[in-house]
């Protein structure tokens, strides 16, 4: 059986699970709880199919190991923030308050459940390209694998810095000026963890493309849709998140002006305070 069929069955089951549980529990973070798990399952399905069908499955095993490391790190970070204890993403509560009940349920089904589960499937499908084109593991594979690992380290550092900040903020009674993190990696990007998360999946896409190029194909193939849609999702989500943060912290506008939103870049000059007579 084509492993893609099995992957589609698992994706359908995951979507149904998220939809049904959101109705039963009246909270919508079930996709968040599966976010770091189902891509690992999908890629390992392709890797195991390759191991069964052929002698050399090096590329797919490397891809599966990388995604497993990504999933383990993200699962740990999500768990320590209480993600598996019934905590709902605060942004969904805000959106629920802006919509009628039936409007939010349509949004829940179409975007939270179906779109996000489809996205988790799409970002995994460079592994399908690698399964279709069983060429030998080469230097390009190794380079993009190292790049994926470097982005993984970057995201780990960013999340740890954010964790320390919020722990310090909690210890200070919930207030720690200016109210948000501006040091470490956050001095160069307002959301370095978001940047590194997206970058990993672009590197993952590149590994799948290597298999196709080695088989006479192009660097550009249809699975780029996954990484591209993930980037669009992060941009939209970041803009919405920042609108909430800016409404809470007056100093955030200056932070936005001086610091790149996603890509880590040198700090821009701060606005000079007006001179007083």
Image: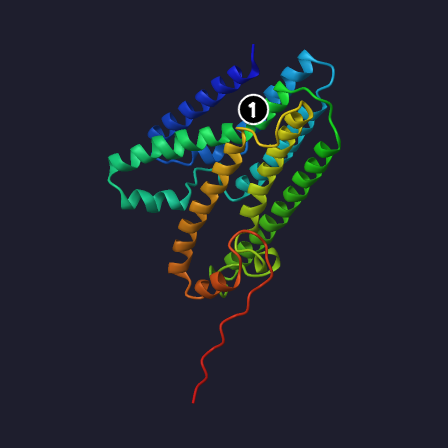
Instruction: Give neighbour class at mark 1: few <14, some 14-19, many 20+ (Cα, 10 Å).
Output: many
Label 1's element?
A: helix
Residue at which label 1 appears: 42
Quadrant of the image for the N terminus? top right
- Name the image quarter holding residue 148: top right
Horizontal side of 110 relative to 12 (left or right) equals left
The residue shown at (60%, 39%) is 200
Q: Is residue 98 above or below residue 135?
A: below
Q: Residue furthest bottom?
A: 277
Question: Between 74 and 206, which is closer to the camera in this rendering?
Answer: 206
Question: Between 98 and 130, which is closer to the camera in this rendering?
Answer: 130
Q: Position of residue 136 (x, y in %)?
A: 73, 23
Horizontal side of 136 relative to 155 (left or right) equals right
Q: Is residue 152 above or below residue 179?
A: above
The residue shown at (68%, 37%) is 144
The residue shown at (42%, 56%) is 245
Horizontal side of 252 relative to 150 (left or right) equals left
- Name the image quarter holding residue 184: bottom right
Q: Position of residue 19 (x, y in %)?
A: 37, 27
Q: Position of residue 109 (x, y in %)?
A: 35, 30
Question: Between 202 and 183, which is closer to the camera in this rendering?
Answer: 202
The residue shown at (53%, 60%) is 259
Residue 72 can be seen, yes or no: no
């Amino acid at each position: 059986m084509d492993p893609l069929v099995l992957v589609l069955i698992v994706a359908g089951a995951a979507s149904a699970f998220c939809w049904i549980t959101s109705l039963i529990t009246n909270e919508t973070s079930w996709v968040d709880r599966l976010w770091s798990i189902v891509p690992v399952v999908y890629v390992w399905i392709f890797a195991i199919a390759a191991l069964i069908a052929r002698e050399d499955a090096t590329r797919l095993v490397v891809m599966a190991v990388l995604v497993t490391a990504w999933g383990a790190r993200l699962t740990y970070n999500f768990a320590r923030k209480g993600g598996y204890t019934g905590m709902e993403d605060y942004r969904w509560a805000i959106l629920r308050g802006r919509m009628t009940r039936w409007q939010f349920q349509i949004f829940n089904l179409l975007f939270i459940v179906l779109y996000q589960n489809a996205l988790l499937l799409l970002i995994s499908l460079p592994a399908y390209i690698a399964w279709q084109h069983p060429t030998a593991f080469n230097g390009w594979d190794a380079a993009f694998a190292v790049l994926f690992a470097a982005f993984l380290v970057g995201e780990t550092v960013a999340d740890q810095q954010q964790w320390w900040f919020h722990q310090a903020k909690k210890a200070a009674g919930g207030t720690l000026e200016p109210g948000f993190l501006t040091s470490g990696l956050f001095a160069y990007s307002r959301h370095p963890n978001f940047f590194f998360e997206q970058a990993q999946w672009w590197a993952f896409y590149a590994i799948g493309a290597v298999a196709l190029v080695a088989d006479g194909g192009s660097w550009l193939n249809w699975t780029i849709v996954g990484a591209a849609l993930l980037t669009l999702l992060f941009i939209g989500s970041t803009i919405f998140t920042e609108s909430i943060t800016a409404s809470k912290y007056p100093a955030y506008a200056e932070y936005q002006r001086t610091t790149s939103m996603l890509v880590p870049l040198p700090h821009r000059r701060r606005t000079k305070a007006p001179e007083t007579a």
